[in-house]
Image (spheres, rainbow, N blue to C red):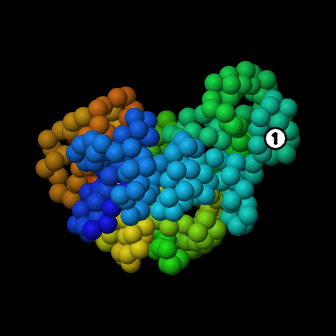
Amino acid sequence: MMQVLVLGAGQLARMMALAGAPLNITVSAYDVRSHTTVHPVTWQNLNQDLQAAIDVADVVSAEFEHIPTDILEVAEASGKFLPGAKAILAGGDRRIEKKLLDSVAVPNAKHHVVLTQSDLETACEVIGLPLVLKSALDGYDGKGQWRIKSLDDVSASWPEIQTFLNNSQSHQAMVAEEWIGFDREVSIIGARTQDGSVAVYPLTENHHHNGVLSVSLAPAAEGDMQAQAFEAFTRIANALDYVGVLAIELFDVQGKLLVNEIAPRVHNSGHWTQQGAQYCQFENHLRAICDLPLGATDLIQPTAMVNILGQDSLPAEVYAMADVHIHWYAKEKRPGRKVGHINVRAESNALLIEKLTKLQQVLPEEDYPGLSEFLEK
């Protein structure tokens, strides 16, 4: 039996625990906010502080990248932490992430670090307009972002940006990025083992509503685009000496892929692998960090994932639909909060769209606007 400690006690740790049980891998989770160690499915308090939880674990991993520095240092000092502090820091700080991408020659948007209004004015000159301003730390689901369309926007937006910087944690900054007129967002999910073996899943197309992921669909593309994504994945993973599952979000610009950001963990856009792939991302993450061979990442059938946001129930008709699988996170509902997801599988893309259309017809449209938008495309 292997013991895995996950930093973070949310739904990703929960799904790792569920995937690990058949492999005799026991997963516990350290809640970095309450400083308690729990079972991520039953929520039983295991009465272990961080060091005690690390001591009994064979491997330590993470379900998110915004881990407090003191906790990250303790995990790294144990010698058990995978994928390691270097990878977590790269995923949690856009400045480090951009340096990494440039160092391995992975295409990404032009960028410039911004701390002052003068820096932003320089960015406008160096990058050009329009551009998007993103927080270097703690930015997710569209938070901490401003779009600058003209020089007038610089002076108009700066007081709000300055307030954001002043109210943020120390070492916060903004990163100005070239505005990319992309055709769609896609992501590549893959795993790398301790001996450097790599396996990736098919490219996934993602649709967001108000900055939050609504729908993911696989496969998104084959051939050259899959090859581009694989090349980016291997360059980044090898540079980090990465172990575990890594997600990379990319912009599709007329068939050319630009990396938007990396996530050093299992990822929302990979939830479809639970029903759509031979072995899901959660099992392959555990296999990689526990030094087991990776499971096949081949597609079983075209599959889509629909996020359940801010709801705690579904119409009975959803439960009766064939090839529809529901995953609840045992979380209290709040507006916009991810509380579960629905995976839908079909024999072809055309049949999958038909099933998603039927699903959309029984879901309250006001609660799933992103699904409606995706189907309209």
- Of 283 and 273, nearer the camera is 283
What residue is at 38 percent from the left and 75 percent from the top?
292
Q: How many labels does the image show?
A: 1
Q: Which amino acid does label 1 sit on?
A: Ala
Placement of 107 over or under 307, stated as above or below = below
Q: Which residue is drawn at 68% across and 28% down?
A: 165
Q: Measured from the top left, where is residue 74 in percent x and y?
A: 52, 50
Q: Is residue 185 left or right of residue 105?
A: left
Percent of width and height locating residue 46: 28, 45
In the image: residue 105, left or right of residue 183: right
Q: Where residue 312 sits in the image (x, y, percent)?
A: 24, 34
**Would residue 39 be visible to someone looking at this image?**
yes
Q: Is residue 297 among what the camera can see?
A: no
- The residue singled out by tag 1 in the image is 123
Tag 1: Cα neighbours inside 10 Å, few (<14), some, or many (≥20)? many
Helix, strand, or loop for circle 1?
helix
Please tell me which residue lies in front, 196 or 212: 196
Residue at (79, 23) in percent of width and height: 155
Is the residue 177 above or below the residue 274 in the image? above
Left or right, 40 with respect to 222, comes to left
Q: Where is residue 128 in the image (x, y as percent from the top left)?
A: 81, 43
Instruction: Tell me what residue is drawn at x 73 percent, y 21 percent.
Output: 159
Q: In this view, does 338 lie to the left or right of 152?
A: left
- Name the one closer to the observer, 179 or 331: 331
Is the N terminus in the top left, top right, bottom left or bottom right quadrant?
Answer: bottom left
Residue placed most toward the observer, 302 or 339? 339
